[in-house]
Image (spheres, rainbow, N blue to C red):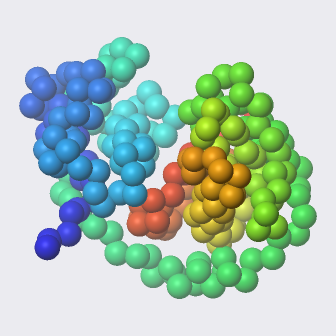
Amino acid sequence: MASVAWLDLNEVIDAFTELGGEAEWPDVRARVTARRGDSYAPYKDWRNFNETMFQHVQQHCANYAKFTGQVLFEKVGPRRFRLAASPVVLPFAVPAPPANYEALLSEATAFEPRGEGHDHRALKEFVANNPQVIGLPLGLKGMTGYRLPSGDCVDVLFENGGTWTAVEIKARSSPDGDILRGMFQCIKYQAVIEAYQTSRELPPDAHAILVLETPLPQALGRLKDLLSVSVIDRVSPRR
């Protein structure tokens, strides 16, 4: 069976084109999903697929904080976008792992935390008190330094009904190896929390997010998709 490709930016552009060049975001999302046979494969779940899809728009829409490329989209309403006058259709290519991928893995494996610094503590407290920065409802209060039965300590944990969201924080002083380590921490936290919920006879419903104060390093972008890790970058308590 042929493998399903990761989401291509051109798929989003084609959806806008089919919808007349301007549309509400839910209609674009539905069109992309329908063209893929109503499947989010090979992404881990619908949330990760949807976030990746919207990141494509954010990275190519100049009035978004995550803008990093050519202007391909324009925002014309709260949830409405249109194609820019002359969108550039980009060739799809799966980037190869960076040359220093093994070096980053070694750096992550050998990384030794040296205690909590001021920047880390400030960002942790900011996220705990501002759940909206990770897409959670206002009014929630995150628990900092939450201990799990595995002995791990989650930087911030939110309980939103039956859904638990673990947040791993990496402040601006974190090197690339520590950020890579944070991706694996998120995978571990989600698995442990779901096991913990099961042990308490609760439905297993957990999600983990890596929050970065700096932009996600380009070398780690592909790995984020491969591991299906949710990353929210450029979050700063200094705004």
Relative image position of residue 45 (x, y in whole percent) = 39, 51
Quarter of the image with the N terminus is: bottom left
Instruction: Give the number of marks.
Output: 0
Q: In the rendered view, does 39 fall on the left or right side of 45?
A: left
The quarter of the picture where residue 73 lies is top left
Residue located at (65% from left, 50% from top): 201
Relative image position of residue 146 (x, y in whole percent) = 81, 51
Residue furthest top in the image: 77
Q: In the rendered view, does 14 fall on the left or right side of 147?
A: left
Residue 171 lies, with reference to residue 85, above or below; the image says below
Residue located at (45% from left, 59% from top): 228
Q: In the rendered view, does 42 fall on the left or right side of 180?
A: left
Quarter of the image with the C terminus is: top right
Relative image position of residue 69 (x, y in whole percent) = 37, 45
Residue 200 lies, with reference to residue 51, above or below; the image says below
**Residue 207 visible, this orientation:** no
**Residue 107 visible, this orientation:** yes
Residue located at (23% from left, 62% from top): 5
Relative image position of residue 52 (x, y in whole percent) = 38, 47
Between 122 and 191, which is closer to the camera in this rendering?
191
Residue located at (52% from left, 51% from top): 230
Between 80 and 228, which is closer to the camera in this rendering?
228
Residue 172 lies, with reference to residue 64, above or below; the image says below
